[in-house]
Amino acid sequence: MRAREPGHGTRDGRGRSRHARPRRRPRRRTLRTAGAVALALMVLAGGLAYWKLGAGLRTVDVNGLLGDRPSHRDGDGSVNILLMGSDTRGDGNGAYAGGADDGARSDTTVLLHVAAGRKRATAVSIPRDTVVDRPRCRTAEGRTVPGSAHEPFNYAFAYGGPACTVATVEHVTGLPVDHFAVLEFRGMAALTDAVGGVEVDVPDGIAPGYGVDLEPGKRRLDGRQAVAFLRLRHVGKDQSDLRRIERQQEFFSGFARAARSSAVLTRPDRLTELMDATGRAVVTDEELGSPSALVALAWKLRGLDPDRIRYLTPELEPDPDNPRAWVRFADSASGLWRSLR
């Protein structure tokens, strides 16, 4: 069944939405990812090149849309950043993927919790087919999306974009989301090319897709190849979404290493070029879209040690209503949210 509701948008975006299609049940396991490292590097780069990026970012005023929201207890000083990937085909993104411009979905969502001391962090991956209760929310266009009990997490982005995804994460975890960033295909391609490509281990059995044929083995991917690698699910017999997430995490780990070893983070000219290119393919919260806030966040994260970032996913179990396609958080997940709060 396809959703028929009109899609979400940013201040300069548009499109229709549909919900994510159910996938078969992924296996339970802890995910190891360096996506948070890549995010930290991006934020630091953005802070240094703010004079370019500040004018290019698209923003969504989540505070104005969602009303009352969770807050940090006693001003604990921690920072929570929600990362989302968008598969929109609009604004030039269709050149990196097949399919029609029929809205946007987010199959990659990571909540990065940076502790008060800014020396350690926890990156929590939220699988797309995890069943949750989605609260009522409003989209960037001001449209009200009714709440729903018991539906896959991915529906929040498909129905209501980043604002409804933020609302759902806050509802499920009880954690305040201080900032968010949505990255589109062309932004990911630009980042990959800017660091000189990213090395990954292409698995056996990966099928050609999106105009790219990747041979198995160690490969350095350019921007277009990177987008295809991040999106492909048809790999051998195991085509679960969690397996795709694992490959995405491997890519982001390679990206973090490439960014550190390249000169992109130390040369203002390359930073300016990079952020000017990616800024047009990024959507953030309104506060993060201002130059001063971007610099402030970059300053907060300057001491974050990549070796002290813990990567995980909450414990999952099959959902009784659709055990072959959906999962739900196990009871132990509530302990994870409490520990982060």
Image (tube, helix red, strand yellow):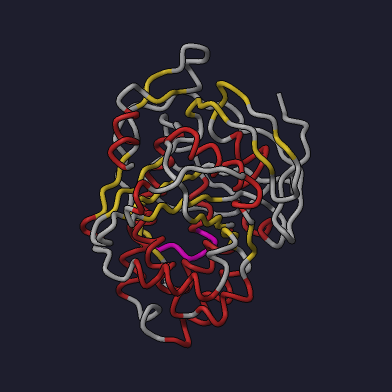
Count numbered badges in the picture: 0
- Residue depicted at x 38% and y 78%: 265
Q: Which stretch appears magenta?
A: 220-225
Q: Is residue 217 visible?
A: no
State whether residue 197 is above or below residue 219. below
Choose between 78 and 206: the one closer to the eye: 78
User: Would residue 11 appear left or right of 129 to someone viewing this image?
Assistant: right
- Residue depicted at x 43% and y 74%: 45
Give the image location of residue 43, x and y in percent.
43, 67
Choose between 38 and 211: the one closer to the eye: 38
Can residue 291 be found in the magenta stretch?
A: no
User: Would residue 311 appear left or right of 211 to someone viewing this image?
Assistant: left
Can you tell which quarter of the image residue 30 is in? Answer: top left
State whether residue 201 is above or below residue 332. below
Can residue 224 be found in the magenta stretch?
A: yes
State whether residue 175 is above or below residue 325. below
Can you tell which quarter of the image residue 285 is in? Answer: bottom right
Residue furthest left in the image:
307
Give the image location of residue 158, x and y in percent.
65, 39
